[in-house]
Amino acid sequence: MPDPYPYDESSRLVAEEIAGDNALALSVGELSLKLKRMVEGEFGHVRLRGEISGYKRATSGHVYMSLKDENAVIDAVMWKGAANTLPFQPQDGIEVIATGRLTTFPGRSKYQIVVERMELAGAGALMALFEKLKAKLAGEGLFARERKRALPFMPPVIGVVTSPTGAVIRDILHRLEDRCPTHVIVWPVKVQGEGSAKEVAAAIRGFDAIAPGGPVPRPDLVIVARGGGSIEDLWSFNEEVVVRAVADCSIPIISAVGHETDTTLCDYAADLRSPTPTAAAEIAVPVLADLRLTVASHRQRTERCARRYVERGRERLDAMARLLPKRDQLLGPQRQRADEAGARLDRGLERRVTLARGGLDRAGAALRPAILERQVERGRDRLAATWRLVQSLNPDRILERGYARITARPGGETLSSAEAARAADTLTLRFRDGTVDVAVEAAGLERPAAKTYDKPRREQQPKQDKPDQPTLL
């Protein structure tokens, strides 16, 4: 009899292992690992062509992005070491060819490509990147005309950023030597390949960082030079880091990258673009021989102008001299007036001498002896009267008639009142023949026991007539 409830595996509640079943249950991690091994084994080396989307560089230096076309999208990662070797700066919208290996990311059950090398997908993609970067930098004003600076006429020091082994530096040095010998400082860099853009930018910033007056002279002009080549060869000078270094440099820069038909973003940022490196050397300095010729020409013109000025001055002077009167005409009246003045001077001197002789005669007549004797007598009488007046005014003459003069000690001033005598400590009585010191008492004057200073009495000398003194009065 058949089982009314046949066994249905889909209706089992608890999973059970069935004998003979080879499909054992796998964990998610086991399946992810199997898939990773299978994908990496099958696609260990692939090259994908696609457009960059969602480009992002993490702080660790790793790059994350997506590669897409019109049908699909695949995630991509580029580790820091590989990202640092890229010869260009990736941007969204640029078509590239990425070389790497396919792998899975178990954490999210997604597959992705680990990019080891990335290249632009043809010249078209390269030009698209060029135009995109050009529009970005132009929008920031790095190519504006008002940023351009005038080049120095004759720079004493020129800095050159280029390869030290190529023909470019030799051409520049030879042309500078031929035109105008100048001090040249070469900053050697790689001009192509990995790391060349960073070296060029570092050289430009290094020249700009040199301080004036230091051991290394600061350039007055910088030439960034490279020979011709394809757009891939010149791509280092299209890198953003180089363009910004050129735009930020405070020293005027000539861009001499490639040949006449080659154009880089460095040309737009520089103060002047040169078609070739050799032409850059010609633009940088003038021709010394031409300068010498110009200076000599200016010297000759200056000399001719100076001679012409002197000649014209001489001509004007001669013309004015012809218009002037002759010397005799100018000096004739003055000579005549001088002769007349000389004649009047002689007559005046004669008259003056005559007048002086008459006055002398009159004065001599007035000097008679009798007149002089009368004048002497009158002078003697006036002198005697003056002496008698002096004798009468002598304060000590009155002492001969019995009076005394009272003086105070110390000081010796003459006292004329009793009040002044009481105020003095000691008094001196001056007589005709000597002095006596007395003390002051309330009742009057008392002779002290002090010394008496007697002067020897002068004998009365007989009065003698003073001799007559001559006078001119």
Image: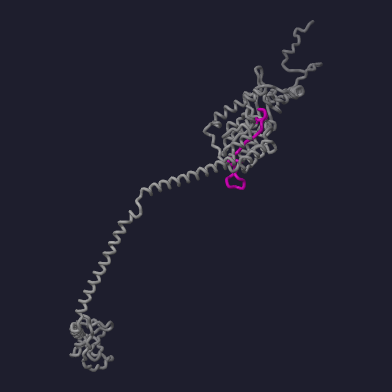
**Residue 225 part of the magenta-drawn span:** yes
Q: Quadrant of residue 177?
A: top right
What residue do we see at 57% from left, 43% from top? 292
Query: Between residues 365 and 121, which one lies in front from this camera angle?
Result: 365
Q: Is residue 135 visible?
A: yes
Q: Is residue 123 left or right of residue 473?
A: right
Residue 221, compared with residue 440, is above or below; it is above
Query: Between residues 65 and 365, which one lies in front from this camera angle?
Result: 365
Residue at the extreme right: 20
Return the x and y of residue 267 as percentages of the image width and height.
Answer: 60, 31
Q: Main secondary structure of the magenta part?
A: loop
Query: Between residues 154 and 87, which one lies in front from this camera angle?
Result: 154
Return the x and y of residue 339 as percentages of the image width and height.
Answer: 29, 61
Identify the image quadrant of the C terminus.
bottom left
Q: How is the image coloured?
A: one colour
What residue do we see at 69% from left, 36% from top? 166
- The mark total stands at 0
Q: Quadrant of residue 46?
A: top right
Identify the magenta region: 207-235
Q: Is residue 170 left or right of residue 285?
A: right
Return the x and y of residue 431 as percentages of the image width and height.
Answer: 22, 89
**Residue 428 part of the magenta-drawn span:** no
Identify the image quadrant of the N terminus.
top right
Q: Is residue 30 visible?
A: no
What residue do we see at 33% from left, 56% from top? 331
Residue at the extreme top: 1
